[in-house]
Image: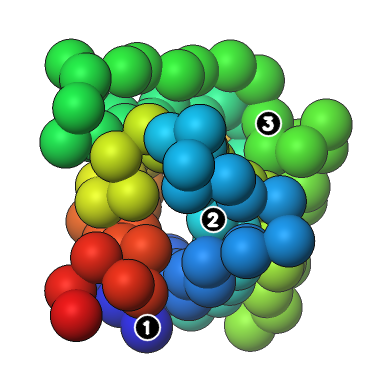
Amino acid sequence: MVTAVTKGVTVMVETEYQPEYSSPSQYHYVFTYRITIKNGSSNTIQLLRRKWYIHDTYSKVRTVEGEGVVGQQPIIEPGEQHQYISGCNLKSGIGKMHGSYEMEQLVDGLRFEVSIPEFQMIFPNKLN
């Protein structure tokens, strides 16, 4: 698990290779990642947008951005957390991701960026 803290907001990431959805002979490797966002600040916040940088050994960096996460723009109260699972496919079986969330404090509308720590996705047999 990797972790980053920005302005009292903690982002933790866990990854897992998904062999049942992957086809290494077709250069198709699927990974899931579980994100936990903990609001350690004293303000209620809302996740508005995400921006991801996806690095795959066999291709150039992909950038993915958009509103919310998995169809939601969660509101996270102080001391509470939000968790979701999403996925990524790679051609090489070795890659990494990192990015940021755009958050808003509901009390005053102040927007700020929260870092998503870099995490690796590695097909288990690639390192053997």
Residue ranking furthest to the front: 25
> Residue 23 is drawn in which quadrant?
top right
Per the rendering, the mark at residue 1 is 1
Q: Among all residues in the image, which is located at the extreme right?
A: 71
Q: Tell me if I can see residue 54 in this picture.
A: yes
Foreground residue, 111 or 25?
25
As displayed, is residue 128 above or below residue 99?
A: below
Q: Position of residue 124 (x, y in %)?
A: 36, 74
Residue 31's disc is 2
Q: Secondary structure at mark 3?
A: loop
Disc 3 from disc 2: Cα separation: 20 Å
Image location (x, y in percent) of residue 80: 70, 78
Give the Cα distance between marks 2 and 1: 14 Å
- In this rendering, position of residue 83 left or right of residue 108: right
N-term-proximal mark, 2 vs 1? 1
Q: In the image, what residue occupies the spot 34% across and 17% down?
A: 63
Q: CA distance from mark 1 to mark 3?
A: 22 Å
In the picture of the structure, the residue carrying the numbered disc 3 is 68
**Amino acid beneath label 1:** Met
SS of the residue under disc 2:
strand
Q: Quadrant of residue 5?
A: bottom left
The tag earlier along the polypeptide, 1 or 3, is 1
Quadrant occupied by the N terminus = bottom left
